[in-house]
Amino acid sequence: MVFYNSLHINYLSGHPPNRKIKGVFQMAYINFKDQWFQELRKVNWLVRERVEEKCRPFGITPEQGRVLNYLFTAGKTVNLTQLSQSLHVTKGNCSMFCRRLEKAGHITMSKNDRDARFIDVALTESGRTLIERMARQMESHPEQDVISPEDLEQILNGLKCLERYLQS
């Protein structure tokens, strides 16, 4: 049985935390905070490496790929503030990613017609073609066959649980 206690988890044989059983504490104590943080850092590093490997042949960074993907998925012009908030990056960083993509011809940036304080960002045909090529290339890799749909669902449920835990 597992008992949750702040940022720690105590694993016991069906008994509450710190309860003496026959004069002995029968528990293996795991510092959950350190363990989940280390695992998350490893996973984050692995994901980042994978994404960089996939973006490199197309001459873009993972961050630029996220911008292109967001614009492609949105299917419409988005203002820079909305884009930065949706990608969870600062407006300054988002602006830098976008300027580089604009220089490469993958997006356009223009002042909003109704409010000049806002910058509108839109995907160009070049950007659309690039993101479609990237999607086709990623679909053709066999790594998606390595993990079962059930395992994917379990991973997603675990991540949602972790998110709820961190927000509490």
Image (tube, rainbow, N blue to C red):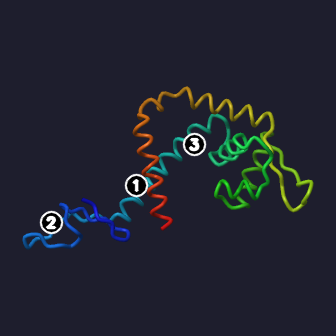
Local packing at callout 2 (Cα closer than 10 Å; few below 14, some 14-19, many 20+) is: some
**Farthest-out residue, left:** 22
Residue sitting at x 63%, y 34%: 57
Mark 3 vs mark 2: in front: 2
> Residue 39, which numbered label?
1
Q: In front: 53, or 124? A: 124
Question: CB atoms at circles 3 and 1 under 8 Å apart?
Answer: no
**Residue assigned mark 2:** 26
The local secondary structure at tag 3 comes to helix
The reply, left or right, for residue 84 in relation to residue 121 is: left
Residue 163 vertical position relative to residue 6 in the rendered view, above or below: above
Q: Amino acid at mark 1?
A: Glu
**Residue assigned mark 3:** 52
Mark before the other along the chain sequence, 2 or 1 = 2
Question: CB atoms at circles 3 and 2 under 8 Å apart?
Answer: no
CA separation in Å, label 3 and label 2: 45 Å
Image location (x, y in percent) of residue 126: 78, 34
Displayed quadrant of residue 73:
top right
Residue 123 vertical position relative to residue 3 in the rendered view, above or below: above
